Image (cartoon, rainbow, N blue to C red):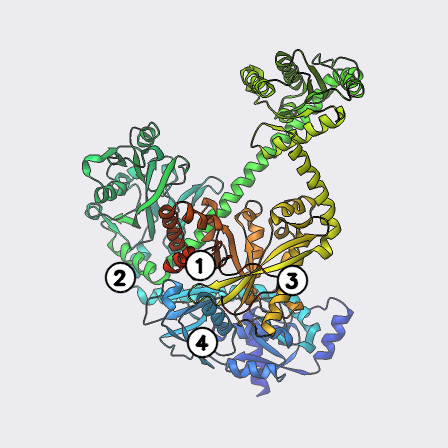
Amino acid sequence: MNRIRILIMFLISFSVGFSTERYIPKNRQEREYLEKIRERTFKVGVVQKNYFASEKIDGVSLNDIVEDMFRSYLGMNVTIEKREWDENYSNFKNGELDILTYLTPSEDRINYALFTQGIIEENLVVVSRDKKIDTINDLNGLEVFVTQNSIYQKFLERLIDKNSLDLKYIEVSDIGDKRPFSYVDSDLNTIGEKNKLILGRLPKATLGLLKEHDELVKIIDNSLDEKYGALIKNWFEKRKEKIFKDKLDKLLTENEKQYLTDLPVLRVAYGDIEKISTYSSLENRYIGIAPRIINYISEKTDIQVIESVNLRKTNWRAWKEKLSDGYIDMMLLSKTPEREKEFLFTNKLSDLNIYEITDLNSENKTNKTIGVIKDSIEEKVALEYFINSKIKRYESEEKINQDFKRKKIDTILSINADNYDISKYTVRVLDVVPMNIVLKKEHIILRDIFNKVIDEFINIDEFMQDSEITRRKTELYEKRAHKNIIVLIVISCFFLSILVMHQTAKMQKHKKTTKELLKDDLTGLYSRRVYNEFCRENIKLEGCAILLDLNNFKSVNDTYGHDYGDKILIEVGKCLQKVFNKDYIFRISGDEFYVFLNCIEDVELKFRKLKKIFKDSTILRNYNISFSLGYYYKKDDVTMIDAFKYADMAMYFAKREKKEWYEEATDEFINQNARKKKLEILIKKGFDKEFYAVFQGKYDLNNKDLIGAEALTRWNNSDLGLVSPIEFIPIAEELGMIHKIDYKIAELAVKETKKMLSQKRVKDDFRMSFNMSVETFRRDDIVEYIFSLLEKYSLDGKNLEIEITESMFLKDAKNVILKLQKLSEKGIYISVDDFTAGYSTVGLLTTLPIDVVKFDRSLMATICENSDKGRSVYIGLAKMIKSLKLKVVAEGIEGKEQYEFLKEIGINYGQGYYLGKPERILKDGNV
């Protein structure tokens, strides 16, 4: 027996690619540890059957590779315990096994197990053989089998709870060879199953070890990095290839196999069709779902396909002639009865949107003229929706777009909508048609082969998702390339400026020496020296202090040089003298100008006159030079220095807010600025003791049961009393203290939630939400901090909800999404706050890990202001959000009429003063 065992181990080692090679310890501690553990026997648990790891690929299974790592590479004595998963898991948990293969980390398992790096990437899928499943809602009413005590079961429970599914599951120790009608399993176990739905990505499976073997974990990770990680990855690739080849071999007839053997190289032509195929100049190829599927079919069937690159710059709509003439062998088209007479079409690759694009000025016209490309799929759709006499046909896209921009037609139908500005046009999907591969009539066998591969192996949703990711990556790369070009230009300008500097050195020196003279050397206006004397000698003088600062001057000065900057300053000086020729005009420094008026009549009229003179100036207009202006009506009890200080404050307010180009420093304005300065001091001083949380309940609108709450920030200052969040939050953001406030409220929210759950005052699925500001969410420690709160108060992630706003995604969206995914994986719910159906927000809803959408109180207000329109808007938005399988929470419910309206249209959850005000201690129960 010993000789046979030695022979078997030799064959395994040989097939995996190892002979006498062994792991080299990285230090003395590792060497001593390995010598010690080689004297004992380790028990390793593997699944006995019905698991992909036991499949033999080229004579080697995944279990063989893992066993070889322990025996041959690490030189350990191991015994392989082959049992069903449930039994192995129980033995490992009880300490009867040292190592359990393919164990997924989870919260409960970290209490008794250690985990190596991930070795298996897998998705959880549900397979049904008796009911078609395309969406998550199709799982309602289904009964599925799932392996008990597995990560699959925990993931399924979370999915049912999150989506309120009517899905029953039966726990079994092993799914078995004869798979039931419906079951939940890894996608690695379900390759070849057509009717399945991906539920989500699972954490990577690892090798689980008892906690006493902590030193062994690092050694195993090193082994995976050095050799066995690559072997495992290669095994999975071979397995996937083998499964495909085996199934394809069974699908194809002998005639079809021979046809593939004799098939010459095929030429394909793609076109710019939204999401179907788009040319990427960066990658110099077409990307999208169609090229991806055709390349996939080519790789799997050994059909050689090349793109006809010389057709890239031609109109793809005219390629039918190229196909008929044999210049190309296949292209992409939508199937119509007329086209079927001339060509063959495969089964559908994807859906193609036909957009109706209308000029906003023509939106309400009854007799619109509709433009379409002649003999196109758009023309076919137009005939189904519009009167033939109103349809105008064009030979080219260039001509139809030209007439559309000139308003010769009101509406066009197009398959591409990306190039149309939604502020000028309304864009809506009029119809959806299938997109197919089109072949010449003689390629019947090829069409049949394509259809078999499409039907059996192509999951359109997966390919569409992968194509979208590739498209976004390409867009990102192109933006980076564009940015690099700009950087090169800036660097070039920098070096050019250095070459010019020595020519302007004398001029700069001259300006510096004359700066303090009575007259500004450049503009001829009064200098800073005169200004200082004027302020000292005219303390009680009444009038109007004005401060003017140029916009875009620095950009022009940096881009075109100081000579151009000087010309602009001289021109500005002339403009000021035309308006304020009888007043004091000072050039203080750079592009700042101070003016003092003795006569305060028609001050704003003079401002408008100055603005017109700026616009009429050729040099200022050419370089887009404008100004921001602040002014203050000085009284005799205010010093001249303070008067210009107030004008300066007003100027910066006008520049920052950009609502108006000028601003008056009124007493109210000055008091507000003084209050802001005071609040800045008090926020720092009172943060620890004066900030607290109040809780406003969220209710089930059907029965008014309390289902959750929102933690809101409040500040009760000892001097000022209650300060509104609208006032102090922007100041805290400017001070860089907002994260401290957010973190404090977050902890108070978690603490209160745990308290209420422990006291049984709320149900187990009670969920507390709180807001995170943009600045807080950009911090690197945000996820770690939230997780630490859950651990500190022993609270489950399902009891928390973090509210975010659209503005979070304006910068570094990728990092924000990564953080949201980590929070979501912990069970924490994510909601979009202040939703008002902004274009960017709606686009994000389909791509982010979002669970809840909170309708902004402004939407509720529209119901009161304009009842019919407001209700229609609210109903439409609610239907859209529900179609995305997201939960809706209505904010701002302040009366019974609003409450009854929301119940009537099927809104399940809400909050507002009608249901309950914010409180320090939340009342439990229902309203």
The image shows residue 844 at horizontal and vertical percentages of 48, 50
Name the residue tied to disc 1.
886
Name the residue tied to disc 4.
146
Vertical position of residue 29 compared to residue 449: above or below: below
- Is 445 situated left or right of 481 in this image? left
Name the residue tied to disc 2.
255
Label 2 – label 3 distance at C-alpha: 72 Å
The image shows residue 176 at horizontal and vertical percentages of 42, 80
Say whether disc 3 or disc 1 marks the residue closer to the N-terminus: 3
Name the residue tied to disc 3.
748
Say whether disc 1 or disc 4 marks the residue closer to the N-terminus: 4
Q: Amino acid at mark 4?
A: Val
Say whether disc 2 or disc 1 marks the residue closer to the N-terminus: 2
Front-most of residues 23 and 787: 787
Q: Amino acid at mark 3?
A: Leu
Label 1 – label 4 distance at C-alpha: 26 Å
